[in-house]
């Protein structure tokens, strides 16, 4: 069990551990698990790659459902609705109908999926004078019509989210405690075989990762194979309203943001106040900002220490 105090002890180490602003909040429990594992072993196995290769994320199902629904709406009407939703900015991040409307301007499954995984609706608005950099997720169809929408989403994650987030997170948190983490599902032969399979071997009406679960069922009880999927998220919202609140409040002070001149206080501070007031679940937005602020603060202090020395 991890408390806010445990998280608070790890957070100051994150800028040096990752050496860049890194905002996947599961970095905290991953760092703690790596530390715990290192007490008994020097090498550990990771299941990374299973979701991207075998249709394991529930968000894939939701994105496919939404894309099918949008297909029933005439394209001109979709574009008009999407433009209106875009004008709401971050308010369209509140879920439900507002979130669905934000997808109505989608050109393809890639646009729908980016909407499902993005934190900030308009991240450039939070950074003074910024323009959002392009990425693989900007493609309307990552496969350019050569595969199914399901394959397109898995490919987008396989070439972006997996190496840039998941593998980075596991590698740096494990190496920070001298633990070697290996990902057997990313053996090139496994990956090549997985990409050759039709979707029916990965998804059924009732479950995902079908083939993996059939193999696993040979070795462990079915009750373990078919447990509900549980992510490795962290209770960031509770932490930011509890033990991490003073730390966050200091980093998000409007005067500080304005003095540093990188992040827009007008974009960030209202979300912090709404979050503290219980009006919105802005913790994912705020964690991105806080990780940048903490990284910047850490290295500013390090440079000041070097100069004094």
Image (spheres, rainbow, N blue to C red):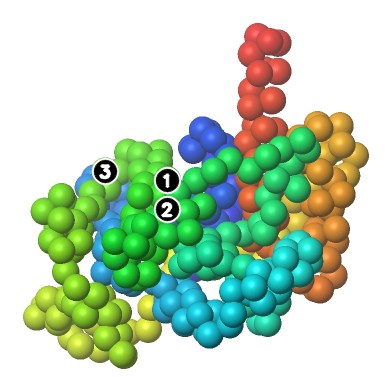
**At numbered mark 3, what does the secondary structure look like: helix, strand or loop?**
strand
Where residue 48 appears, x then y in whole percent? 30, 58
Which picture quadrant has residue 154?
A: bottom left
Residue drawn at the location 20% of the way across and 88% of the way down: 222
- Residue closer to the observer: 181 or 75: 75
User: Neighbour class for label 1 at 10 Å: few (<14), some, many (≥20)?
Assistant: few
Q: How many marks?
A: 3
Q: Residue 72: x, y in percent? A: 53, 85
Work out which quarter of the rendered image holds the C terminus and state it. Answer: top right
| Residue 164, disc | 1
Residue drawn at point x = 64 percent, y = 23 percent: 302
Q: Earlier in the sequence, mark 3 or mark 1?
A: 1
Residue most extreme to the right: 255
Residue 99 relative to residue 227: left or right:
right
Residue closer to the observer: 230 or 258: 258
Q: Marks 3/1: CA distance?
A: 18 Å
Q: Nearer the viewer, residue 50 or 138?
A: 138
Would residue 271 be found to the left or right of residue 239 on screen? right
The residue shown at (78%, 63%) is: 87
Q: Could you tell me if the residues under marks 1 and 2 are in contact, i.e. CB atoms within 8 Å?
A: yes
Spatial distance from mark 1 to mark 2, Cα to Cα?
5 Å
Q: Nearer the viewer, mark 3 or mark 1?
A: 1
Q: Is residue 106 visible?
A: yes
- Cα separation between marks 2 and 3: 21 Å
> Around disc 3, counting alpha carbons within 10 Å, would you say few (fewer than 14), some (14 to 19), or many (20 or more)?
some
Instruction: Please name the residue that numbered disc 3 is placed on.
Output: 180
Q: What residue is drawn where x is 70% and y is 45%?
A: 124
Dot placed on the residue nearer the N-terminal end, 2 or 3: 2
Mark 2: which secondary structure?
helix
Q: Which residue is mark 2?
A: 161
Give residue 7's quadrant in the image. Answer: bottom right
Residue 22 location (% of width, % of height): 54, 44
């Amino acid at each position: 069990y991890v408390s806010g105090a445990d998280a608070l002890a790890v957070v100051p180490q994150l800028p040096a551990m990752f050496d860049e602003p890194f905002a996947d909040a599961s970095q905290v429990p991953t760092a703690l698990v790596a530390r715990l594992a290192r007490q008994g072993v020097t090498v550990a196995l990771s299941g990374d790659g299973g979701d991207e290769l075998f249709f394991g994320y529930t968000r894939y199902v939701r994105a496919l459902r939404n894309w099918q629904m949008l297909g029933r709406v005439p394209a001109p009407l979709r574009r008009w609705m999407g433009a209106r939703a875009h004008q709401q900015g971050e308010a369209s991040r509140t879920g439900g109908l507002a979130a669905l409307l934000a997808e109505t301007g989608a050109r393809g499954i890639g646009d729908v999926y980016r909407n499902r995984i993005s934190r900030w609706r308009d991240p450039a608005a939070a950074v003074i004078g910024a323009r959002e950099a392009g990425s693989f997720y900007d493609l309307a169809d990552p496969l350019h019509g050569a595969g199914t929408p399901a394959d397109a989403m898995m490919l987008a994650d396989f070439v972006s989210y997996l190496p840039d987030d998941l593998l980075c997170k596991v590698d740096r948190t494990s190496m920070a405690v001298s633990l070697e983490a290996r990902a057997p599902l990313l053996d090139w032969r496994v990956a090549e075989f997985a990409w050759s399979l039709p979707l029916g071997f990965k998804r059924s009406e009732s479950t995902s990762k079908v083939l993996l679960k059939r193999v696993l069922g040979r070795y462990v009880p079915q009750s373990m194979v078919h447990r509900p999927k549980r992510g490795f998220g962290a209770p960031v919202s509770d932490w930011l309203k509890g033990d991490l609140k003073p730390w966050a409040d200091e980093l998000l002070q409007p005067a500080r943001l304005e003095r540093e001149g990188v992040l827009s206080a007008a974009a960030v501070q209202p979300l912090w106040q709404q979050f503290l007031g219980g009006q919105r679940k802005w913790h994912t937005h705020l964690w991105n900002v806080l990780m940048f602020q903490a990284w910047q603060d850490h290295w500013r202090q390090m440079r000041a220490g070097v100069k004094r020395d």
